[in-house]
Image: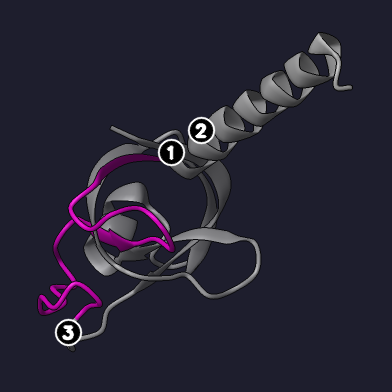
Amino acid sequence: MISFSSIRTVLVTSIALLMFGAASANAACGGASWYALHSKTASGERMNPSALTAAHRTLPFGSKVKVTNQRNGKSIVVRINDRGPFIKGRVIDLSKGAANRLGFVGAGHTNICMARL
């Protein structure tokens, strides 16, 4: 026979895992780089290197994300329109325009924190 305590433990653990999973998709800190292609993005729109756009592995296209450069405190809001990054440790790829506003075009990459709006 299954006890109430066992059911409660499984239920609480499941809810915690679901909440943690949702939070991690909506907020994260890690590496960011920039790219400036002139081809189509995964969403089907043409890449505009000067636009404030970004690539993320799982967030829906059109999502707005606040990105803060941890090295200088600069923040911007970008729109997700592509998929990536595909390099370990990176959580987002930004357009060249977004990287310029965040102050890391010359470095090529930086550490950021991001939060879905």
Give SS at disc 3. loop
Q: Residue at x 43, y 38 (%)?
A: 26
CB contact under 8 Å: marks 1 and 2: yes
Q: Disc 1 marks which amino acid?
A: Asn
Query: N-terminal of the two: label 3 or label 1?
Result: 1
Q: Quadrant of residue 40?
A: bottom left
Q: Is residue 82 above or below residue 19?
A: below
Q: Position of residue 12 (x, y in %)?
A: 69, 19
User: Which is nearer the eye, 107 or 83?
Assistant: 83
Q: Which residue is label 2 attached to?
A: 23
**Is disc 1 surrounded by few (<14), some (14 to 19) or many (20+) residues within 10 Å?**
some
CA gap, disc 1 and disc 2: 5 Å
Q: Quadrant of the image for the C terminus?
A: top left
Q: Which residue is label 1 attached to?
A: 26
Q: What are the residue bounds of the magenta stretch?
A: 41-69
Residue 23 in view here? yes
CA gap, disc 3 and disc 2: 30 Å
Magenta part mainly helix, strand or loop? loop
Query: N-terminal of the two: label 3 or label 2?
Result: 2
- 53 lies left or right of 83: left
Q: Disc 3 marks which amino acid?
A: Lys
